[in-house]
Image (tube, grey):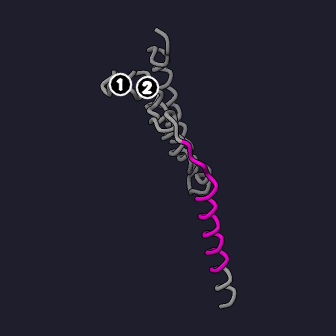
């Protein structure tokens, strides 16, 4: 009981000290740059109806696709503990080949080119 009370008191004291320091230390001097919103590299001043570049959308979709690939391949190291690890590795190879073919198709079609 004594150890539990000591831990609670130390954590409470540490929290109070950190809160006090966080209120006392910073001297906030907000200026125009700090107060303006940052919106994906676009100038936030002006109309919100500006056309969105399709190149940014393509890069975002490709990022999500390959991020999903990493999430699907994450349990692969535990695949050798199954009864038939060959099946797991063949499915993995199939997914990788499919994604590689998709990337090659996008590349050949010119979807990854930034300049026209």
Separation of disc 2 and disc 1 at Cα?
7 Å
What is the magenta segment's predominant secondary structure? helix
The quarter holding residue 6 reads bottom right
What percent of the width, then of the height, locates residue 94? 50, 36
**Residue at x-position 61% and y-position 69%:** 15
For label 2, the crowd category at 10 Å Cα-Cα, with few meaning under 14, some 14 to 19 and many 20 or more, is few
**Residue at x-position 58% and y-position 59%:** 23
Q: Are marks 2 and 1 in contact (CB under 8 Å)?
A: yes
The quarter holding residue 51 reads top left
82 relative to 105 in the view: left or right: right
Q: Nearer the viewer, residue 2 or 15?
A: 15
Q: Is residue 85 above or below residue 94?
A: below
**Part of the protein shown in magenta:** 8-29
Query: In the structure shown, which secondary structural element does the residue marked by tag 2 occupy?
Result: loop
85 relative to 37 in the view: left or right: right
Residue 43 marker? 2
Query: In the structure shown, which secondary structural element does the residue marked by tag 1 occupy?
Result: loop
The residue beneath circle 1 is 46
Assign the N terminus to one quadrant of the image. bottom right
């Amino acid at each position: 009981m004594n150890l539990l009370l000591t831990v609670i008191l130390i954590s409470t004291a540490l929290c109070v000290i950190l809160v006090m320091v966080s209120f006392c230390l910073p001297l906030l001097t907000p200026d125009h740059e700090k107060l303006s919103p940052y919106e994906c590299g676009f100038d936030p001043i002006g109309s919100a109806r500006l056309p969105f570049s399709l190149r940014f959308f393509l890069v975002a979709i490709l990022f999500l696709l390959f991020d999903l690939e990493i999430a699907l391949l994450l349990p692969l190291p535990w695949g050798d503990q199954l009864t038939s690890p060959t099946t797991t590795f063949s499915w993995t190879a199939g997914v990788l080949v499919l994604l590689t073919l998709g990337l090659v198709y996008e590349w050949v079609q010119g979807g990854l080119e930034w300049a026209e």
